[in-house]
Image (cartoon, grey):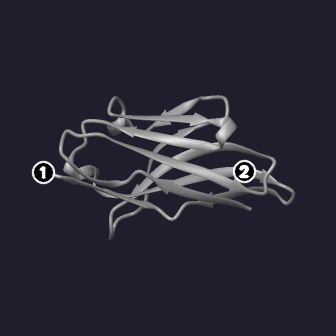
Amino acid sequence: QVQLVESGGGLVQAGGSLRLSCAASGNFFSIATMGWYRQVPGKQRELVATITSGGGTYYTDSLKGRFTISRENAKNTVYLQMNSLKPEDTAIYYCQALSRGSDGWRSAWGQGTQVTVSS
């Protein structure tokens, strides 16, 4: 199984930046897609961005240009650089990974990291 640990969240003023990290560990053969999602209490979790092992990326349209996802395959780590942050970006940010292990493909989630943007 894969364990995901996020870090880098915190409190920032509007217009500021944060960089989230998510490191994967555990027993697996490979990790395919990794991604970031976010959730505001009372609302559905929404996709922020994904990245494949080959570096292909996908972003939610509304976040293009401000957020950048990247990945270090050798470290099994995915990053989310968030710039020009807005109060509406306040949410819990979750890392997700699709990995292949001895029992096939599995999806794993991190515990989440809080991002709070003050106005």
**Residue, x 65% and y 41% (percent of image)?**
75
**Residue, x 29% and y 40% (percent of image)?**
17
Q: Gap between marks 2 and 1, in whole Å?
A: 38 Å
Residue 70, placed above or below residue 40 = above
Quadrant of the rendered image containing residue 80? top left
Q: Nearer the viewer, residue 2 or 37?
A: 2
Q: Are marks 2 and 1 in contact (CB under 8 Å)?
A: no
Residue that sits furthest to the bottom in the current view: 42
- Dot 1: few (<14), some (14–19), or many (≥20) neighbours within 10 Å? few
| Label annotation for residue 34 | none
Q: Which residue is mark 2?
A: 99
Quadrant of the rendered image containing residue 92? bottom left
| Label annotation for residue 119 | 1
> Which amino acid is tagged 2?
Ser
**Residue, x 40% and y 37% (percent of image)?**
81
**Residue, x 69% and y 36% (percent of image)?**
74
Q: Nearer the viewer, residue 20 or 47?
A: 20
Helix, strand or loop under label 2 = strand
Considering the image in quadrants, where does the N terminus appear?
bottom right
> Which amino acid is tagged 1?
Ser
| Whole-percent x, y for residue 23 in the image | 59, 50
| Whole-percent x, y for residue 56 in the image | 59, 29
